[in-house]
Image (cartoon, rainbow, N blue to C red):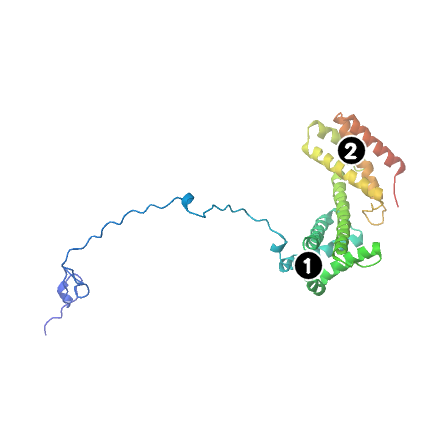
Amino acid sequence: MPEEKKANDMDLDFFDIDVDLDNPFAGDIKKDSKSPVIPEKEPEITLPSLDEVPGFEEVEHTPQRRSSKDFNPDMDALLMTAQSPMILEGMKYYTQGNFSSQTMPVYLEALKGIALYIKILDRNPANFNKLQKLIDADSDCKEVETIAFNLFKMIHGRHPENDQEKLVSFERFEQLFKEAASKASISNSMKLLKKYLLMSGSIDELKVRDLFKRGNTDLKADINNLAQHLQLGLDLMKKGRHEIAKGLKGRDLNIYVIKASYLLYLFYSLAGNENLADHYARLHNNYKKYFIIRE
């Protein structure tokens, strides 16, 4: 038996195919014996400039500001349902008379939530009315609306009857949280004041003098904070709504005024500002002598 021929990639005789290697695609494409025809060069076309085109004007595109039409009730609904629980959380602390420094973030979030209700009502009352079904169905939103309308009723003896009166209701609610945030802010300033107190409760004058000589930046920042919050506290006391710690009837705020005014007097005396030093000295003496508390 003759020996079988083994396949070898380099052995062209193994491929039993009749192929014209000079023209492997001869069966598909036939060569044209005629010489190729070279097309004539097309004449060049000159395009007119933009200025020569009739009716052409450059249009300047300016970004359009968003209007109330760009907002839809669905987005407003999403925001309202997200913020309403924070409003109720702030209201819980308010009714408890809790204005400690820890409540500050809660009151600020509650303010954002009330501002959202006001914005919707003021921007597009029709959207607010479209959201009424959501408000009625969502317990948190409904409670927020009820509180706002009851605040209006406390003043006018009835619930709001139109969009403008609804807006007034939420603005009154906003004012309530602004006052709460102010009290919480003063509480935070009270904590700051403790840095400069001795165990006896008096101002640590040696520490203050030393920090002043060294030009301590924290002392300067704290003085600015105390001056701002001292005035805020005085404004609350004039309004008669100055109870920060429940049951103290303003005694805590009064003590804050006495100690903060003395620290400010000391600082401005060291700084050579006689006018401010005298101002805070009078304030300190008045509140220390009479311990002013408005019921």
Q: Where is residue 177 drawn, in percent x and y?
A: 75, 50
Name the one closer to the observer, 144 or 86. 144
Q: Which three-letter amino acid code belongs to the residue tagged 2?
A: Leu
- Quarter of the figure with the N terminus: bottom left
Where does residue 136 sit, x and y in percent of width and height?
A: 72, 64
| 17 relative to 86, above or below | below
Q: Which mark is residue 263?
A: 2
- Quarter location, residue 192: top right
Q: In screen coordinates, is 263 left or right of 63?
A: right
The residue at the point 84 percent across, 55 percent down is 156
Q: Is residue 190 above or below residue 136?
A: above
| Residue in the foreground of this view, choosing between 250 and 122 | 122
Q: Which residue is denoted by mark 1 in the rendering? A: 126
Residue occupying the far left of the picture: 2
In this rendering, the answer to whether 152 lies above or below 202 is below
Q: Is residue 200 visible?
A: no
Tell me the element at label 2: helix
Residue displayed at 41% across by 44% down: 52
